[in-house]
Image (cartoon, helix red, strand yellow):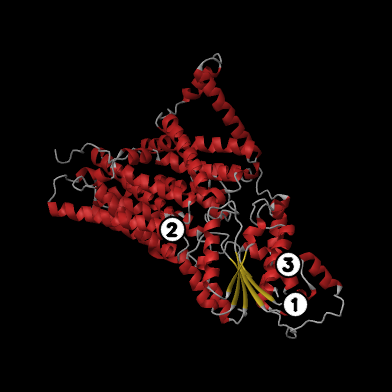
Amino acid sequence: MENQQKKRRYITGLDGLRALAVIGVIFYHLMPGKMRGGYLGVPVFFVISGYLITDLLRQEWQSNGRIDLKSFYVRRIKRLYPALVTLLLGSTAYITLFQRNLLDNLRAIFLSSLTYVNNWWQISNGMSYFDRFNNESPFTHLWSLAVEGQNYLIWPILFILLMKFVPKKQNIAKFLFIGTLVSAILMAILYQPGSDPTRVYYGTDTRLFSIWLGSLLAFLWPSTQLSEKIPIQAKRVLNLAGGISLSTLILAFFFLDARYSFVYYGGLYLISLAALVLVATIAHPGANWNRWLTNPIFSYLGQRSYSIYLYQFPVMIFYEAKVKNIAENVWLHTVIELILIFGLSELSYRFIEKNKIKWRFDTLKQFFITLKEPMSTGKKIQYSLVTVVVLIGLFGIVTAPANLITQEQREFQEAVEKNTNAAKDTLINPKEPEEKVNEKPVNNESPTEEMQQIMTRYQLTKEQVIRGKQLEITAFGDSVMLGATLNLQEVFPHIIVDAVVGRQLYDSVEDLQKLKDKGLLKDTVLLGLGSNGTATQGQFEQLMAVLGNRKVYLVNVFVPTQRWQNDVNRLLADMAAKYENVTLIDWYDSSQGQVTWFREDSVHPNEIGLDAYTSLIAQEILKE
């Protein structure tokens, strides 16, 4: 019969697409300078999820004329919760034993993840997806599961209402299409250029368009109603469309950085459309893409993509917290982390996901019965280990502090606030020197007590201190330079400081141009950029176009905990060699082996380090 539901088919090529998506996400975190758009694996997952869930709901509706909501939610819980709960308890136990600095707010993080509202919890608590220095949590990535979970809760109910009260399926498709546009427009409206985009990146309202585009495809392209026998020309069109969309995604994975404004002004929507086209060509049995994306490696990765996604971020956070020289051996540590990620994912898939734990009341009873068996039995040993991990995890959750700030963190925050206020004051009330520098400073006068303190603290001569007090200079940089504002002011009282936490080199041109337009860009410029991520030669050249022929002093970076350190320093060295008016100040080389110079993040200088940082800069700028 025509209205009889066709046999459900497993689309193996979608495992291939999942494999590509999870590879993108992993390498976005492991090698952000090379896989700048790997985060786009998430909207690909969203489109696949929206398509498959809605396709299954349509099949059930056609077969039964109704949707069993209870069965739907139970299936989702059985599919998602075992691996998620295992990750949460296992990671919490590890944190409790070995990384207690991550205990802060752990209870709220655990509960928000378990209830699939973690994205909104992170937004409300000012967390940033793009700040690895101040947002070091192994559960940051669970925001995307929350978005999907909220859709799983709402969409089946909305689906039933639409099927009952909107008889024409094309009208349902129109409704979904309008919904995707509203979501994308909301993203564009809420996005604020130059600020952290986490709100629109995390928001369910601003990310729903990817999932609903998949749902829209399920109405236009139901998997059970696609014919394998199609005209050769139609097959060519489908294959070409799939090739173009896959090429678009791969290029975007490598080049579409998450901080580009284009991403939030329709870029993510276009990427989701490309994913939609690729899903459509994979799902169609008349095209070749299902076969082309089906192979043992892709099938292996695709089937385990959920576990891989769960474990990739915790492994990186835990491992990199113990290894402080990631930047010096990037490939070695990348291989080690990949082994750990895939090893844990395989265990999760084999023993948790594939095992399909049965959620019954007698399961817990059976668990305790097994615990009473002799210790010699293998199952007793396994269950005992599980019990220990669960108890440690629960202890960590119960005892975890809320909004705890350590003494060092409090001191750092206070220092940042003081330096921020001082920097703002230089922009609002810039000080002009009263007189020009003498060509030959007077040497027959004894230095004042203030001058002597500066000479001693920063290892400067009397002549250098005098020149520093007269020099007009603009300092432009990120949080490392911001932290040195008060120190730099001691040597250069007339300095103008524009430094911001989290500033990236590649999005600094506009801010630098504003300084120039206000007449605050002096003839001597100190640049301290690169601590927060990589950049390209073209982006640096845009900065130089603004700076012109000014004398530029370029401070390289010391960020041993981040993979981009050496890439940034190579770029800065190349640019210093290319431009005659650029002088490189080698903070990286000076910092080698100086563990007492830095705070616990090994990046931001403490009081001792700030003296060394300022001394290095002052000696270079004031050099004879």
SS class of the residue under badge 3?
helix
**Marks 3 and 2, the one that precedes in the sequence:** 2
Mark 3 to mark 1 CA distance (whole Å) = 13 Å
Pointer 1: what residue? 469
Residue at 42 percent across and 27 percent down: it is 358
User: What amino acid is labelled 2 in the image?
Assistant: Thr
**Marks 3 and 1, the one that precedes in the sequence:** 1
Residue 339 vs residue 416, the one in the foreground: 339
Name the front one of labels 1 and 2: 1
Residue 457 vs residue 236, the one in the foreground: 457
User: What amino acid is labelled 1 in the image?
Assistant: Lys
User: Which quadrant would the C terminus be assigned to in this image?
Assistant: bottom right
In this view, 229 is above or below 611: above
Residue 434 vs residue 164, the one in the foreground: 434
The answer to whether one can see residue 156 in this image is no
Pointer 3: what residue? 487
The answer to whether one can see residue 295 in this image is yes
Image-quadrant location for residue 603: bottom right
User: What amino acid is labelled 3 in the image?
Assistant: Asn
SS class of the residue under badge 2?
helix
Residue at 44 percent across and 31 percent down: it is 352
User: Horizontally, is 14 left or right of 197 in the view?
Assistant: left
| Residue 206 marker | 2
User: Residue 517 in the image: x percent, y percent?
Assistant: 56, 81
Mark 3 to mark 2 CA distance (whole Å) = 43 Å
Mark 1 to mark 2 CA distance (whole Å) = 51 Å
